[in-house]
Image (cartoon, rainbow, N blue to C red):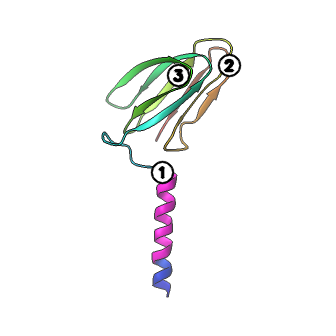
Amino acid sequence: MWKWLVVLGFACFTVACHDLLGPECSESHKCRLQIESNTSWSGAFGGVNATSSYNGTGNGWIEYWGEVCYSLQKESDPGFLRAYYQETDLGRAETTAPFGVISGCNH
């Protein structure tokens, strides 16, 4: 009986960890940084090997894989800017400050 409890406990732990960590991001299964805003924004996004500049107005997203970080700035006084990785709870940030800056990493 105890063996079944160990197997059941391990299975539940495995499922819970997968839900917590989200799917693996890879070149064939890209993940997304979701950006929500009611104003213009710009910033940088990247990892160890490369960083790219981005800009936009309103909502958008950046596809990625691997360990990455972002830094985004509002290009206006009024409005809001928020960003989060869809696959994890890490890296969530939001600002309503004039020309506010947000940043976060997925690791």
- What is the crowding at mark 1: few (fewer than 14 residues within 10 Å), some, or many (at least 20)? few
Determine contact: label 3, label 2, CB under 8 Å: no
> Most prominent secondary structure in the magenta stretch?
helix
- According to the picture, the residue beneath numbered tag 1 turns out to be 21
- According to the picture, the residue beneath numbered tag 2 turns out to be 97
- According to the picture, the residue beneath numbered tag 3 turns out to be 72
Tell me: 77 left or right of 22: right
What distance separates the C-alpha of mark 3 from that of mark 1? 24 Å
Look at the picture and state if 17 lies above or below 6: above
- What is the crowding at mark 2: few (fewer than 14 residues within 10 Å), some, or many (at least 20)? some
What distance separates the C-alpha of mark 1 from that of mark 2? 31 Å
The residue at the point 50 percent across, 80 percent down is 5
Specify the segment rendered in magenta.
7-21
Q: Position of residue 75 (x, y in %)?
A: 58, 12
Q: Position of residue 19 (x, y in %)?
A: 50, 55
Residue 15: in magenta span: yes
The residue at the point 41 percent across, 32 percent down is 63
Q: SS for tag 1?
A: helix
Sequence-wise, the earlier of marks 3 and 1 is 1
The residue type indicated by label 2 comes to: Ala
